[in-house]
Image (tube, rainbow, N blue to C red):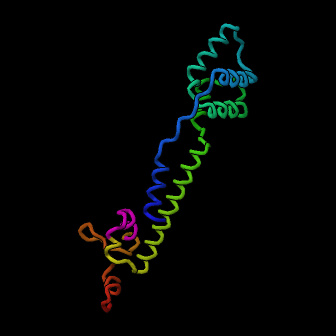
Amino acid sequence: MTAEQRRDLRAIAAAPLPVLRTCSDEGFDRCMAALSILPRRKSGSDEGAVLLEVYRRALGGLPSAQLVWVVDTALVRLKWFPTIAELLEIAGEWRRDDEHARAQARAEAALRHDRQARYDGAMTALSRGEMDQGAIDALPLPWAQAAARLGWLVESAGRFALPRPVAGRINGEAA
């Protein structure tokens, strides 16, 4: 992968996701009605209206897709009409799965794969003593430290280099 491709993928991965639309009042009412199939304590009709408004204040700002997922999950998981706290806990488990979120996840995965491939290539070259000093100096510090722990590099005064006999072979000297 080229540096330009990595830059483009980083931009996609770091871009804020578009804000999702919150649930409409009608949609919210339908979701709460769906939850009403779960048993709950007895209440008067006035108390039900107050309860609906309290739930709306606490949960009405959720994106529509998230609220529907929360209600579907609550219906499967819970035995009693849920508290706001239970619904918010379930809401915390939700992960976006729209086109933008999937594109961002693909970009992040491609970057992880590329980074791992570059790391593996660097470690293979270092294990064989096939990396020149300029490339060693360009290594990310954690990579150089890992190679030093494996004995493929030595550190001196904060700088990493191949062990002497290997370095001599790369520079054309007799070992």
Quarter where residue 151 is shown: bottom left
Q: Which residues are magenta?
A: 137-147
Extreme-bottom residue of the structure: 174
Q: Position of residue 28 (x, y in %)?
A: 65, 23
Quarter where residue 158 is shown: bottom left
Q: Main secondary structure of the magenta part?
A: helix
Q: Position of residue 132 (x, y in %)?
A: 34, 78
Extreme-right residue of the structure: 37
Q: Position of 109 compared to 24: left or right?
A: left
Q: Position of residue 163 (x, y in %)?
A: 33, 79
Q: Position of 21 compared to 133: left or right?
A: right
Residue drawn at 38 percent across, 62 percent down = 142
Q: Position of 4 compared to 85: left or right?
A: left
* Front residue (pair 105, 53): 105
Quarter of the image with the C terminus in it: bottom left
* Front residue (pair 77, 104): 104
Q: Position of residue 124 (x, y in %)?
A: 46, 75
* Front residue (pair 150, 72): 72
Reply above or below: 168 against 105: below
